Image: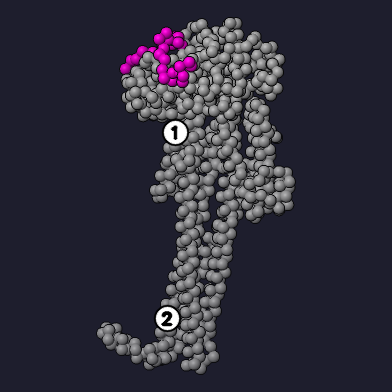
Amino acid sequence: MPPLGRLRPVALALGAALSLTACSTSLIPVTRAPTAVRPTPATAPGTAAQAPANASCDPVASIRPSGPLPLSGEMPSGSWMAQILDRGRLIVGISQDTLMFGYLNPLNNQIEGFDIDLVDQISQAIFGDTDHIEYRVLTPAERIPALESGQVDMVAETLTMTCQRWQQIDFSTQYLQTYQSLLVVKGSPVHSLQDLGHGKVCAAEGTVAYQQAASAKTRPTVVGVTEPTDCLVLLQLGQVQAITAAYPILVGFTDQDPNLQIVGPPITSLSYGIGISKKHPDFVQFVNSVLEQMRSDGQWAQSYDRWLSQLGPAPTPPPAVYQ
Amino acid sequence: MIAVLPRWGSLRQRARLIREQSGTTPGRLRAQSLAIGMAGVALFAVGAGIMAEAGSTVAAIANGTVPAILGAERLHATLADADRAVANAFLTGAVEATGPQQEFQLDLASAHRQLALAADRAAGQPAELARIQAVSAELAQYTQLVATAQDYNRLGYPVGSAYLRRASALMHQSGTGILAQVDALAQLETDTLSGQDTALAITGMVLLVYAGLVIALLVMLVRTQSFVRQHFKRRRNPRLLAATALLLVLTAGSAVEVLYATESLFVAQGQAYSRLLGLWEMRSIMYDAYGNESLNLVARGDGNAFIAAFNSETSQLASATMTDTLVAEAAHGDVAFNGLLATELEDASYPTERTAALEMLVAFRQFMGVNGAVQTSLLHGDHASAALLVLGDQPGDLGAAFNSFDAAAGRAITSVQAHFAQTLALVEYSLFACAALQLLALGVAVLAYLGLKPRIDEYRS
């Protein structure tokens, strides 16, 4: 974005804040939000959200592919992929307002992002093109129920792999490792969940971040919303003091409003996987094969560079872990 | 000779003299003349008062309350249309989609004009003014949210959609949303109309007093005529007869005017007013329904709430799934479904209105047909085709069907409103004319006095 272009969101956010809220702007100089942080800190803590439901659970271990990828348009008979092929469209649950991952770009009216690139690769593998995808926008809380009820074939929407969720759905192998963090207005005295006390923190319902905030020892007031971006609006309107969500999502927020900054240590580590119904383990294996291919042929790194470069240089793709 | 009351005599003396004179012929004539005169003046005062009061109430209904109610309905429709235009602009995706954006700006400007007009009308009414101020404040907030959303859209940032969601929620939120505030304003005015209707009903009951006075005056005139005939050996007193005839003319004239006004008022308020409200309600509902269709597409598969709202709204217009057969039957006067459209088709009184109502039905049928095509496209995952159908304004598109419905509703409203205003103006004129007619009551008193004066004078000489 050109320099002047970068100032526009600043002005916009300031304008919105001045006209819509009574919150004052701090004049205390603060450090800029980090712009080049690797998605996975070496010391990202494990937490209750990822604690296995049983001792043998590894939340990032998926089902090993049974063989090489079938040719596109020639799915194994009786497989879920064959049914998708027959149906003529791959139905995918996505977000349409998560910058960098899955969002409707108002400038070209296309849904774009890192998650969408993964979906495109899976569609390529099934159909040989990307023209057979039906997107269904899901709120975070709707993702698991949509998979369980069969409304969608898969969910590619920054879905964190947890042992609790493994009991409801299956996951592909992890495609991104990151962590949960905290976002505040620049100059805010809040630098961690502990600093908030009983203050208001916003999180999208149905997310790991929401659970984490709700179970924090300091008992902050968690304001639940249906979409993560609703949190950004609430923060800009001065109705909450902080937002907690996955770090890349918060980076997307700072991009949209440079008056905000990410603070504090990582709250918990998160691994993203593609959610798939437990009824279709063959589809999980198929998707894992596609992800393997993306890791090895550089597609993953290309997508990362295209969408997530603000998180830092493309790291090595998260390794596939199998059960 | 008639005895003259001592000017400065004691009350006892005066009372004795009146008692003595009331038994005499001239005394009775004077008493009768006085009673008729007083009754005539009372008849004038009561009659003119009732009619002037009723006329003022009707004028207040015609020029104040009903325009305020219809203004609130119009404001509701305009604001719902503004929100629809915003949803369409977002669905279009183009940053500066001129069509929907222009519609939004026009709606917004119109809404501000209507609010200013409503504030003028509500001068001196604190409850109404408070509502109007609340709507204005929320509308400013809404406009700011939409502007922020559009600014973010121009920058290519998805948080714009969150601002749009918030703006739309502010518009439609039950109880405290902008449209709910506008509806509450309409309800305040409707309460005022109920009060005015009650006032008219009470005025109608005071007509019994008027009727009693007429009967009393008539009895007095007949008995005085009879007294004069007996005591003066004259067959009749022409001026007393003229006074009686004038009283009958006054009574008949007043009765005709009151009956005409009552019936016209009943027709205007009981029928035309109800239809006007119904037509505005249908218009608003269609704006909401079209907006929900757009928002459902914006939500991309997560729009069950919008679909439910769309179905609920359109079922208020017609209870049955609209088919060509139902439309054809309705065109022949056989309306085989329920809902606001059915009521309008059955009650439409004027040719222009009836034609427009049928056009609304045809457009509604097309609207629902295109909606079916939109849902089919969505079912097959073809979001792009569905969006084209919703945004398009060519024949076969949702926009075209909506525009046809809106134009027909506008024609029906214009027709009914013109008749309604004309009828109320005639009622108002009729009531004020009737008030003026009450001057005849004074004529009755004068004629009676002139008829009796020569007889009284005979005793002076």
Between B402 and B456, the one nearer to me in the picture = B402
Distance in Å between CA atoms under marks 2 and 1 = 69 Å
Q: Callout 1: residue from which chain?
A: B
| Viewer-closest of B140 and B234 | B140
Q: Chain of mark 2?
A: B
Q: Around disc 1, counting alpha carbons within 10 Å, would you say few (fewer than 14), some (14 to 19), or many (20 or more)?
A: some
Q: Quadrant of residue B374?
A: top right
Say whether residue A70 is visible: yes
Could you say whether the residue bearing mark 1 is in a helix, strand or loop? Answer: helix
Question: Of the residues shown, which amino acid type is indicated by label 2?
Answer: Ala
Assign the C terminus of chain A to one quadrant of the image. Answer: top right
The answer to whether residue B365 is left or right of residue A239 is: right
**Lower sequence index among marks 2 and 1:** 2
The amino acid type, in three-letter code, at marker 1 is Gln
Name above or below for residue A306 compared with residue B264. Answer: above
Q: Which-is-in-front pick, marks 2 and 1? A: 1
Residue B141's label in the rendered image is 1
Give the SS element for disc 2. helix
Q: Residues within 10 Å of mark 2 (few under 14, many from 20)?
A: some
* Residue beneath the point at 47% across and 89% down: B227
Name above or below for residue B347 compared with residue A107: below
The magenta region covers A28-57
Q: Residue at x 46, y 42 (%)?
A: B175
Mark number displayed over residue A37: none
